[in-house]
Image (spheres, rainbow, N blue to C red):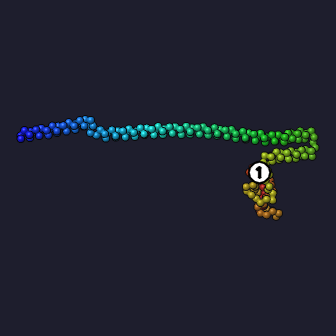
Amino acid sequence: MARMREETLRGRELKDEGQVEDTQERDLENPPGEDTLDSNDMSSLEKIMTLEAELTQAKAKADEHYNHVLRLQAEFDNYRKRTQKEKTEIIKHSTERLVAELLPVLDNFERAASSAQSNPDFNAFSQGVDMIYRQLQTALGKEGLKPIEAVGQPFDPNLHDAVLRVESDDHSENTVVEELQKGYYLKEKVLRPSMVKVSN
């Protein structure tokens, strides 16, 4: 009986030792917390790799936008220079055209001055000057110059420059009674207002 009890106790000890050894082997194969550590490490690594990929993409987009802005700036600079050059050319050519229109007028003034020295006929000289005046009006009219009507018109401070106010029985109040210097439009814009006398 004592022998049986001893064998039973020994069997239990062996069984307990076997369980301890199995547990130790399992612990050595799978140290505590290793699975959790691996999954945490993997998830952190994935996050870093994802962030690095996003950063690379963002840098590429930023470089692309920066290059696009540089191209736009260069194109705008070229456009500005080109339009400035075109504007200068237009002004230059418009001046050339006007001067070309005025050259015959200048020629006729020279002829009239030369004729007045050799031929003292005042009537011929007067007719020549009148012809030159009409020629000059025609040349400037082609460029859009047009006289402002003043005498008999109601006074308009946008068109008339009143230098005198006079009493007048023939005109109503604030009416232009006399033009002292002619005013002109240039293509519908007032180039110079008329200098006038206005009735009280």
Where 198 falls versus 121 (above or below)?
A: below
- Image location (x, y in percent) of residue 185: 76, 51
Q: Quadrant of the N terminus?
A: top left
Please name whichever residue, 136 or 57, is drawn nearer the observer in this view of the structure: 57
Looking at the image, is 147 positioned above or below residue 84? below
Where does the image place residue 87, in percent across and percent down from the top left?
70, 41
Query: Does residue 123 sit above or below 29 in this rendering?
Result: below
Please, what secondary structure does the residue beneath circle 1 have? strand
Instruction: Name the residue type under label 1.
Output: Tyr
Say which residue appears at 41% left-offset and 38% top-offset.
49
Q: Quadrant of the C terminus?
A: bottom right
Quarter where residue 7 is shown: top left
Q: Identify the residue at horizontal 77%, vertical 57% (top origin).
A: 164
Q: Position of residue 147 (x, y in %)?
A: 80, 52
Camera sees residue 122: no
The answer to which of 7 and 140 lies nearer the viewer is: 7
Q: Residue at x 79, y 59 (%)?
A: 153
As drawn, which residue projects farthest toward the left?
2
- 73 left or right of 133? left
60 left or right of 29 in image? right
Residue 80 in view, yes or no? yes
Residue ID for mark 1: 185
